[in-house]
Amino acid sequence: MDVIVIGGGIVGVATAYQLRTAGHRVCVVERHATVAQGATYGHGGIVLPTPLDAWFGPTFLGNRRGVVYRPGLKSSARRFARRLAQLQAPEAFRDQWLRLRPLVELSREAIASIEAGFHLEFEQREGVLHVTRQPREWEQVQSALDLLREFEMHHHVLSASECADIEHSVPAEPAFAGGVLFPRERTANCPLFTKLVKQVLDEQGGVQFLFGRAVEAIRLENQRAAVELAPAEGERKSAREVDVISCDAVVVAAGAGSAPLLEQFGLSLPLHPIRMLSLTAPIAYEECTPHLTVVDSIRRVSMTRMNQRIRVAGAAVLQPERELAKPLAEPLAEAGAALLAQATHDWIPGAAKISAAHEWEGLRLLSPDGLPVVGNAVHPRLFVNFGHGPAGWGLACGSAKVIADLVSGTTPSVPHDTLSALRAERFAN
Ligand SMILES: Cc1cc2nc3c(=O)[nH]c(=O)nc-3n(C[C@H](O)[C@H](O)[C@H](O)COP(=O)(O)OP(=O)(O)OC[C@H]3O[C@@H](n4cnc5c(N)ncnc54)[C@H](O)[C@@H]3O)c2cc1C
């Protein structure tokens, strides 16, 4: 089949890869000049989410420590946060993790197969250490630890002094509650991986990349589908002259730009974009630099070494949707950067030269039940793959495989429960 993928982030590129592997011809349409320019650009490095990284459950948005701004009581952002908060109860958290877990494991296999098949090097490092400051916050992470035990995920629960012994850059003083080490979980460079997968596709053929063009609308008919393109920069067109590319199926993998493309079909999804910040700082002192990725589990800040730099990512800025089109107000940007700098100072003091850090912010689309939106939607020729929240890097390769199976008419290898929980139509109930 001829398939158009809208979006050239990690999700779109991974989808193109899986579709091509399944034998389809693919065209990726991306409004930027190259791949990995959206949320994919500023990722924090964590490859696959554990229950401690999931974007629902007892530690997510449930405390003020990792959130820079909370909107007014009546705003849609506040309603969204309330819906997510319903998943803080241990049983609800467990049920949702059960639905997500097969997608995590499918992604693990899909990434391993790409890595092994093409010998890709994208700054992979093993070892993630989650740390928690206060004893009452340690209580909050217990339901995540229960899931780690139940599903026998390889991990070690550590005291503060054991954390400091294993990762010399984390000071044992001032005292902190404890940590969890995932010796086999990995971090890596997501934009680099995305570009390498594109390179593989360029070399193999069968996938065309159309850059600098935005999709304005999708057309769906019984026999064919098509996308309408906005004029390229500097191009003038009359209302009647529209560039249209036809195909057999369309996959919307446009990150935060996905929901507007679906509104024409009456699909209004309650997803909310959350702004996240990152600081990329040169290493200050080599001997203070962590060899593990250190994550503040409650503030949700990850500190990852990437070559000669440290990437510090987190600081969720929850804003009403109308404010998202504007640049982030300076006081909020400063508060976000201060939160990231403070986490760095607390957990890996002396490692990063924060005064020379490059600041970046991006939007990641989050669903109110914490699961991405993946599958066929509205029409047999329309597929969706977005809303992966803070774990898009990790889940992209698995959700791309699900889409390729569905487009090919093959049953995906994740359980039916997971597939139904990912469908766009789940919000209609
Ligand atoms: C600060 C930060 C830290 C993060 N840390 C991690 C992490 O450690 N681990 C992890 O797994 N995830 C992390 N994430 C989340 C992860 O980066 C995202 O989930 C993932 O990159 C989403 O990929 P995507 O391809 O869906 O979106 P994007 O990368 O945003 O790509 C979507 C693309 O679609 C294009 N597009 C949109 N609309 C149109 C249109 N109409 N026509 C043509 N093109 C269009 C955009 O230009 C964009 O390039 C982080 C995110 C942020 C912001």
Image (cartoon, rainbow, N blue to C red):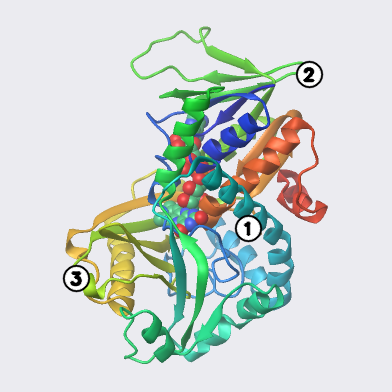
Q: Amino acid at mark 1?
A: Pro
Reply above or below: 105 against 137: above
Q: CA distance from mark 1 to mark 3?
A: 41 Å
> Which residue was labeled with disc 3?
285
Question: Closest to the observer: 330 or 278?
Answer: 278
Q: Quadrant of residue 345?
A: bottom left
Point out residue 17 in the picture as x, y percentages from the top left corner: 57, 35
Q: Quadrant of residue 140?
A: bottom right
Q: Where's the N terminus, which quadrant?
A: top right
Q: CA distance from mark 3 to mark 2?
A: 62 Å
Residue shown at the point (25%, 58%) measured from the top left: 308
Is 242 on the left or on the right of 144, as rendered? left
Q: Amino acid at mark 3?
A: Tyr
Contact (CB < 8 A) between labels 3 and 2?
A: no
Point out residue 167 in the picture as x, y percentages from the top left corner: 37, 79
Reply above or below: 304 against 385: below
Residue shown at the point (46%, 8%) measured from the top left: 238
Point out residue 188 in the picture as x, y percentages from the top left corner: 43, 55
First in sequence: mark 1 vs mark 3: 3
Q: Nearer the viewer, mark 1 or mark 3?
A: 3
Q: Amino acid at mark 2?
A: Asn
First in sequence: mark 1 vs mark 2: 2
Is 211 on the left or on the right of 350, as rendered? right
Is the residue marked by circle 1 packed among few (<14), some (14-19), or many (20+) residues within 10 Å? many
Contact (CB < 8 A) between labels 1 and 2?
A: no
> Which residue was labeled with disc 1?
368
Q: Secondary structure at mark 3?
A: loop
Q: Secondary structure at mark 2?
A: loop
First in sequence: mark 3 vs mark 2: 2
> Which residue was labeled with disc 2?
222
